[in-house]
């Protein structure tokens, strides 16, 4: 068996130790005589898995008591609709900050339910930067302000948390959650699809301030109301049990490795090494303004795009996989989430230097 370094943006690499533990527990979880996949979600075994996962997540992110953690399905994309359906159902005004492809999708969906004000957009820069606090034109009376702390496709990350003057701040943390400590109390809702930095696809995490639950209009489908999931401990219907379990193993793994402070140090180091390899070369380029560069998703281009496929073939032969950039941006993209070891980033940097030496 040989494991590659997988730079996919999502579904992405999982920690090898987590996969091994899942393998060991696959046929018989802790003497239950069955796999976690086969358990009743209401049985005491799965309940203990679910509760432990939530407790570990709460301790990692220091989630305050007045926030609920929901383990849902539907992906971050379902949250694009659930947020306005729950918080702005009467066509209320809402503020959105547009910093890239995922912001745009969230905005398009919100327009179906709410009166959307674009508080700032960086589209003119081709989404290569983030707006400063003083550039945000917030309505003041909006139901909420929505932003995307890390744009997975453009590799642009906010270097600060927007101030909203008391208006609930809603954040799509899909590709940067658990990459470093955050202050949850700054947010109304934090949401994330699991398949980037949490676990397998199929699980969606929502951390929501209590007072934002229960505001949906009566005709909102029950599955789309936060209250439904909150009132039932995320078990109104069958939750994504195996994803929940695997996320729990990842939370444990993070705690064992020193928690989010340790991850922040590691992620800062990994991304700084890669950006400096790009910046110190005339052959590779990254268009993002340095203060807004993502720690998680690093897009880069080659001086000669005709060499792209040769670069990718050579990388693949070295066990460096899924480096092709998103079709909307082109070039390459290296996603280096928590589970990407430092050796993986170094192997990529070494390969890039050698490729440049031969082809530059
Ligand atoms: C991947 C991604 C999404 C979409 O997530 P799904 O779970 O596939 O719906 C949304 N927002 C961001 C920032 C992402 O990276």
Image (tube, helix red, strand yellow):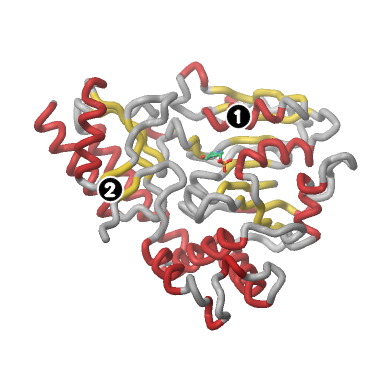
The residue located at (67%, 72%) in the rendering is 47
Q: CA distance from mark 1 to mark 2?
A: 30 Å
Provide the residue designation for mark 1. Answer: 105
Which of marks 2 and 1 precedes in the sequence? 1
Does residue 166 appear anywhere in the picture? Answer: yes
Does residue 212 appear anywhere in the picture? Answer: no
The residue located at (71%, 36%) in the rendering is 81
Say left or right for 196 vs 205: left
Can you tell me which quadrant of the image ligand 1 is in?
top right
Q: Position of residue 306 (x, y in %)?
A: 23, 20
Say left or right for 143 vs 72: right
Q: Position of residue 146 (x, y in %)?
A: 65, 35
Provide the residue designation for mark 2. Answer: 345
Disc 1 is placed on an element classified as helix
| Along the viewing direction, whichever of 62 and 32 lies nearer the viewer | 32
Q: How many marks?
A: 2
Q: Write down the quadrant of residue 248 in the picture.
A: bottom right
Note whether ligand 1 is within 8 Å of mark 1. yes
| Along the viewing direction, whichever of 238 and 58 lies nearer the viewer | 238
């Amino acid at each position: 068996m040989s494991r590659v370094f997988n730079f996919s943006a999502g579904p992405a690499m999982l920690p090898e130790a987590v996969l091994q533990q899942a393998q060991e527990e696959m046929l018989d979880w802790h003497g239950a005589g069955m796999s976690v996949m086969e358990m009743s979600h209401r049985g005491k075994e799965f309940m203990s898995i679910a509760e432990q996962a939530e407790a570990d997540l709460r301790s990692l992110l220091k989630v305050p008591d007045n926030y609920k953690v929901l383990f849902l399905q539907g992906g971050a994309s379902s949250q694009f609709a659930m947020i306005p359906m729950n918080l702005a159902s009467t066509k209320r005004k809402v503020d959105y900050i547009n910093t890239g492809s995922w912001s745009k999708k969230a905005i398009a969906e919100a327009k179906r339910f709410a009166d959307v004000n674009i508080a700032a957009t960086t589209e003119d820069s081709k989404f290569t930067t983030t707006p400063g606090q003083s550039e945000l034109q917030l309505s003041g009376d909006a139901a909420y302000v929505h932003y995307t702390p890390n744009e997975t496709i453009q590799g642009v990350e906010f270097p600060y948390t927007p101030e909203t003057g008391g208006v609930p701040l809603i954040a799509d943390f899909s590709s940067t959650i658990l990459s470093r400590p955050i202050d949850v109390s700054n947010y109304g809702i934090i949401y994330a699809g699991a398949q980037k930095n949490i676990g397998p696809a199929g699980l969606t995490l929502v951390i929501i301030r209590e007072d934002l639950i229960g505001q949906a209009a009566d005709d909102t489908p029950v599955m789309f109301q936060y209250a439904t999931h909150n009132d039932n401990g995320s078990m109104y219907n069958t939750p994504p049990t195996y994803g929940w379990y695997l996320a729990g193993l990842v939370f444990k793994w993070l705690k064992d490795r020193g928690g989010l402070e340790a991850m922040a140090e590691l992620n800062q180091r990994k991304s700084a090494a890669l950006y400096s390899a790009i910046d110190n070369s005339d052959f590779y380029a990254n268009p993002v303004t340095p203060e807004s560069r993502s720690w998680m998703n690093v897009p880069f281009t080659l001086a000669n795009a005709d060499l792209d496929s040769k670069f990718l073939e050579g990388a693949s032969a070295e066990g460096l996989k899924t480096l092709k950039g998103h079709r909307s941006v082109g070039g390459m993209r290296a996603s280096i989430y928590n589970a990407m070891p430092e050796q993986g980033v170094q192997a990529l940097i070494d390969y890039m230097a050698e490729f440049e030496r031969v082809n530059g």
